[in-house]
Amino acid sequence: MERAAKTIKKHSQEIIARWEAKVNEEISASHQANNIVLRDQMPGILDNISEVLQRYAALSVYQSSVEFEEVVENSEDHGRHRASTEAYSIDQVIHEYIVFHRTVTEVLRDNQTYTTEISDLIKYVMETAILKSSVAFNVSIQEMQEKLVGTIAHDLRSPVGTAYGLLEMIRKEQDPEMINKLSQMAQRSLQKSLKLSEGLLDAISTRAGEGMMLEFSENELVQEVRLVHEEATQVYSQEIKLVCTAEEIIGVFDNTAIRRVLENLLTNAIKYGDMNRPITIRLEDESGQVRLSVHNYGNPIPPEKQQYIFEYLKHSEDERETPVQSWGMGLTLIKVIAEAHKGQVLLSSSEEEGTQFTVKFSKHNELGKVRTKNFNNSSKDKTINQYS
């Protein structure tokens, strides 16, 4: 077995290169990942196999070894990564391991170091890797679907709650003009809730590497923001200011998604801000992009929390009841929508200056429906902390 271990170490680069070439040839989804990402966990598993062949002659001893734990960890990482890579399916994940097993076996046979004992041990390693990777892949897809459904359900509460509040106001209102105005606002809120309900069905069918569906068209943004501001001032008692110098901002946006961004930021600013001080919405036209920000006073977000506040479901157990965790789902949505609009999210928060979330959107996006990347696959370098 020692000879086989040395053969694998000596030919490790060759094995990875041959495996990569075969995967690219046989598995179409592999073209969605660059070469570095494609091979990320496989060298580790190959090292594990070499260590196993060098140290263990019995499966019972190997199963309790550090190498076994490393195989499990590497294969689980592999499955989670493939779940965030577009177009992968469970059979393609398994296919990758089959190709890997075949490649290792071929190299050992070419170097005349392949025996029945070695075959049994490698087969067990591969079976373990396939099992753990497949489970991790399925769990990651399920988590992604749950995140999308949870986010949409979370956002449904806002338009439904707004419509309910407006209907209550209509019931008590006497002025026909105001009743008509409130009725139109309630209708817009209910229309939005219907769109979000359609998104629930779309989220259930999410596949590897996929997030929510956005629909880009040429839109005017100022009026959309003014409508959100108007509805918020009717529903909430807290002072909400709107600062916008542009008469109109035209670009290719998903206005419904941008509306969700603003409503999420407003809801959180009201929930966690100082109710005795105003919230300010600011919309600015900056040539090729738009800057939308929401500012509030109140308890700041601690600097150590800011680095992962946009990463939904990444908070530790003891933080589940804190405001940071509650912000997480909506903020992850905001980050994904910003990146889908070729933009970014900016955060500044201090006790003196208050908290401000700024979202930048490009005005030049491609027309039509676009499936966003999933929450785990969004680019971390596009979330910028202005304060720390």
Image (tube, rainbow, N blue to C red):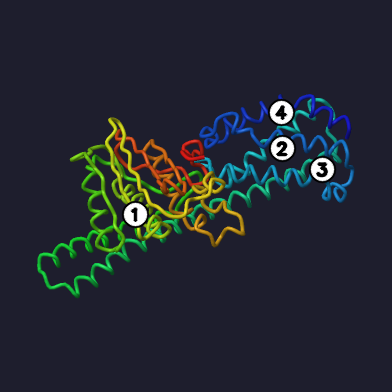
Q: Is residue 38 above or below residue 124?
A: above
| Distance of label 2 from label 3 (alpha carbons) | 12 Å
* Residue 340 in the image, given as x and y percentages of width and height: 39, 40
Which element carries disc 1, helix, strand or loop?
Answer: helix
**Image coords of residue 31 (percent x, y):** 52, 32
Q: How many marks?
A: 4
Q: Which residue is mark 2?
A: 101
Amino acid on which the number 4 mark rests in the picture = Ile
Badge 2 or badge 1: first in the primary sequence: 2
Which of the two labelled residues, at mark 4 and mark 1, occupies the earlier sequence position?
4
- Mark 4 or 2 closer to N-term? 4
Residue extending farthest to the front is 352
Location of the N terminus by quadrant is: top right
What residue appears at the point 32 percent right and 54 percent down from the top-left corner?
A: 278
Quickly name the residue at label 3: 121
C-alpha span from label 3 to label 1:
56 Å
Q: Which residue is mark 4?
A: 15
Q: Secondary structure at mark 2?
A: helix
Q: Is residue 295 above or below residue 360?
A: below
- Which of the labelled discs sits on residue 263, or is there none? 1
Q: Secondary structure at mark 4?
A: helix
Instruction: Evaluate whether residue 383 shows in this view.
Output: no
Q: Residue at x 26, y 45 (%)?
A: 243
Residue at image position (62%, 30%) is: 22
Circle 4 Cα neighbour tier, 10 Å, few/some/many (<14 / 14–19 / ≥20): many
Q: Tell me the kind of residue under disc 3.
A: Leu
The answer to whether mark 4 and mark 1 are in CB contact below 8 A is: no
Mark earlier in primary sequence (4, 3): 4
